[in-house]
Amino acid sequence: MSTQSRMALTPHLRQLESESIGIIREVAAEFRNPVMLYSIGKDSGVMLHLAMKAFHPSKPPFPLLHIDTRWKFRAMIEHRDAIAERYGVKLLVHTNPDGVARDINPISSGSQLHTQVMKTEALKQALDKWQFDAAFGGARRDEEKSRAKERVFSFRSAGHVWDPRNQRPELWNLYNTRISQGETIRVFPLSNWTELDIWQYTRAEQIPVVPLYFAAPRPVIERDGQLIMRDDERMALKPGEREQVRMVRFRSLGCYPLSAAIESRAATLDEIIAEMLASRTSERSGRLIDSDEAASMEKKKRDGYF
Amino acid sequence: MTATSDDARTRKGLLRFLTCGSVDDGKSTLIGRLLYDTQLVLEDQLAALERDSAKHGTTGEDLDLALLVDGLQAEREQGITIDVAYRFFSTPRRAFIVADTPGHEQYTRNMATGASNSQAAVILIDARKGVLTQTRRHSYICALLGIKNVVLAVNKIDLVEFSGERFHRIVADYLGFAAPLKFAAVTSIPLSARFGDNVIRRSEHTPWYDGPTLIEHLESIDVREGLEEKPWRFPVQWVNRPNLDFRGFSGTVASGVVRPGERVVVAASGRESVIQRIVTADGDLPEARAGDAVTLTLADEVDVARGDVLAHADARPEVVDQFAAEVLWMIEEPMLPGRSYLMRIGTQYVPARVTSLKHKTDVNTLEHMAAKTLALNEIGFCNLATATPVALDPYADNRATGAFVLIDRFTNATAGAGMISFGLRRATNIHRQALLVDKSARVRLNGHRPAVLWFTGLSGSGKSTIANVVERELHALGVHTYMLDGDNVRHGLNRDLGFTDADRVENIRRVGEVAKLFVDAGAVVLCSFISPFRAERRMVRELLAAEEFIEIFVDTSLEECQRRDPKGLYARALEGKIKNFTGIDSPYEAPQNAEVVLTPSPLGPEEEARLVLEALRARQIIGS
Ligand SMILES: Nc1nc2c(ncn2[C@@H]2O[C@H](COP(=O)(O)OP(=O)(O)OP(=O)(O)O)[C@@H](O)[C@H]2O)c(=O)[nH]1
Ligand SMILES: [Mg+2]
């Protein structure tokens, strides 16, 4: 990180950066046992980078937590381990053992059950297991309309329940960090960032991202009108399906059978930004889990999803 | 995402604004319109909007643009906004963050949430309805929160045949009301959120209007706050101590500018030092300006902790333990003067009480009215006292050091939002009489330590009986004691108080202060009061040193107390002859961490008294 990259930040990005650093420090100062959810995507990358900056010359006083559904792209897991090593932070990984025992998976169980068991339930298990009282998430308000409604410090009653109709007022930056036994807070330091901000900041600060965000020739199949990259043998081909190599990239990364690729030639950060500015669809359009049912994000969030 | 060029947003700077006004005036529709007309609604979102409009829409066959913003299921089903939504959009000239707030009075706190970080307000009025109570309430809250730039958006102009006359009458009405609020500018625009007139597109239906469209106006508003010209304030957020050689103070500069070499003070203690370095992950900086998140190191080893405020030695904030403030109340349970709340100001939490409620303000007329409590959504002018002195500035001078929230100590709910008007008493000016004989001298003379034994429990639980036996035993041991109970206090000191919640709080507060004086005199004070509220017991606890307060919960069940009913009070309460009787029509909040819990002993009060004495020995209040 050189002084030069700092100079390259626009006032807008610098303002966002400072605001997020303030939020991250606040959690470290007030909570007994915080954790940073690390989902390996571009937002997590920015959030971790901000945490490193917030505590410099100390290290972030909390670990990272990855909820591993066992269906992430292999390139993501490689990236995750490389990042933990490079930044020198502690990484915790949790997989829901019940889900493994029941062989819950995104293909035959369906995306809804898979998400519920392997993500939401797994997350709650992990928070309980390590007794975390605050958890950072990289969600942004511009992602989705129920996220646009959420506080920066978002209260969860015992059992990790979000009650969107009864959120604590949140005035100025005077965050109410008080909780009782069993209650927790989800904290969203990137609330006011947009997708464009994330990419511009990633470029300015040279933050490493999973190579899958960049266009490259990759083997994909076409299923239900979406391009899916078959990352391993577990995903069987249906009759008539065949793999073909296309120039694709991902706007949003998750479990590989649930993350649709887009055809693209954008192979650099500059090209990704240019492509996004011209795009007429949202980043979430490639996520197969969101279209499950109307208001599905809010419902998942109430259940404890991030 | 935005259809804006890479750096468009840097030019004019970000504008944060909110939409507010009465129910159904079209706030959400307006934001939906802004997003739609600035082409920020993408194809998949548009498809979803079409589906949603068919299902939940309020606009017949048309797209219901409010559904772009009303993102909660309950909101879509009811067609109203419940909580604030933050949306982002940009034009080639400026980037915006807009907070769409609810019009319903019930959700006023969510409107205040959205307003607290806004630099400008768009106040909507339904052209058919004119200025309503909520229009006034929201305008008043905007003014209190320091918003200077207001747009009066006279909406649904399509429904009044685009009448200029109607527009001008509403504007005149509003300006008449708003004059005392002292907005720097009120810009009035006739528009139709539903059809887009004068939002982005100039309307051909309002030839009588030659002012700017809404977006033109928002693009041009100048909201520079001059934060960097204000005195430097740095609330310390976190002490950064990676190893013995580095001790830095992390935080965000609230106002002003600071440079290495400058003389600074820790506001509360007055300790001085010099800024050594301004540390960031990108290297040291030559200066830190308002809004920068940095880590400072000082030249000397001065005592600095989270919650402290650093300032320049020649431009310090006030350090006071009493101040006056406007308070907006945000929870169902009313604000009670005397009750202890947790106050969050800057990076600090400190116990605070409202010592007096000067008046509340009628949002319709802006008149001041006498009041004893503040109910949900009411706004009042109060004096507050904090347990320890705090560094602060008037809110009008500095939002960051002049704003606070009050937190309910038991539910942890964010109960009130406050804006400081002025400090009342400089803590540094309280010259306490220097004492030649102090508490420790008295302890040596007495041969025992002072304490408050606080007996709490239902009426008839046995508090006074047990306390009497304890006092007799202590006296026999040569301990100086004094008994405070309802009977000797209510007839004299607290003769003016009744049994409303507010009076009960004040009753206990006074008892606490008297008990504190006795403790200072070296005595063991036995207090037996029902004291049903945790908040008040905690308030007394906080007046004293940790080891001086011993809470004794006389845990006799309500059934047992009713069976005993020594004074016949339960019988009368059950007949409705006594109001606000604890356990019957007024709650008792049992202690959760009492030092001693006494359940009825078959051996009687002597046995219970013995347990209390044992606890006093264990705590070395008295010798063994
Ligand atoms: N004809 C007409 N109808 C409008 C206009 N603006 C809003 N409406 C309608 O008024 C109704 C209420 O609009 P909303 O945008 O939900 O109102 P709101 O102010 O956000 O309401 P709350 O947030 O619940 O206080 C909807 O049916 C809109 O379609 C307008 O300019 N003209
Ligand atoms: Mg609305």
Image (cartoon, grey):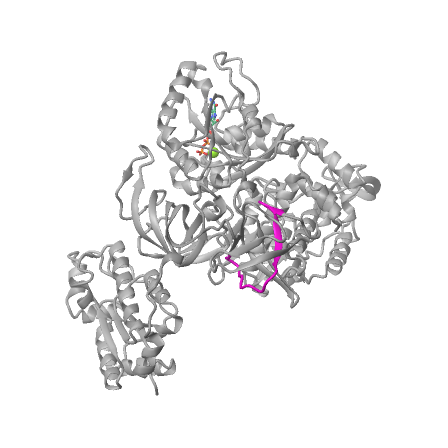
Q: Which residues are magenta?
A: B288-308
Q: Is A136 located above or below residue B113 in the figure?
A: below
Residue B426 visible at all: yes
Query: Picture quarter containing residue A260?
Result: top right
B145 vs B335, nearest the viewer: B145
Give the image location of residue B95, x and y in percent: 61, 33
Residue depicted at 75% across the width and 46% down the height: A4
Give the image location of residue B585, x and y in percent: 24, 57
In the displayed image of the protein, which residue is found farthest to the bottom?
B624
Give the image location of residue A143, x and y in percent: 62, 41
Where does the C terminus of chain B fall, quadrant-wise? bottom left
User: Across the whole image, how many numbered discs are drawn on residues?
Assistant: 0
Residue depicted at 69% across the width and 61% down the height: A89
B267 horizontally vs A4: left or right: left
B551 vs A230, nearest the viewer: B551
A190 horizontally vs B534: left or right: right
Q: Dominant secondary structure of the magenta stretch?
A: loop
B300 horizontally vs B482: left or right: right
Residue depicted at 51% across the width and 60% down the height: B271
Does residue B204 belong to the magenta stretch?
no
Q: Is A19 located above or below residue B506 in the figure?
A: above
Give the image location of residue B353, x and y in percent: 35, 55
Does residue B299 belong to the magenta stretch?
yes
Residue A199 visible at all: no
Query: Picture quarter containing residue B507?
Result: bottom left
B412 vs B590, nearest the viewer: B412
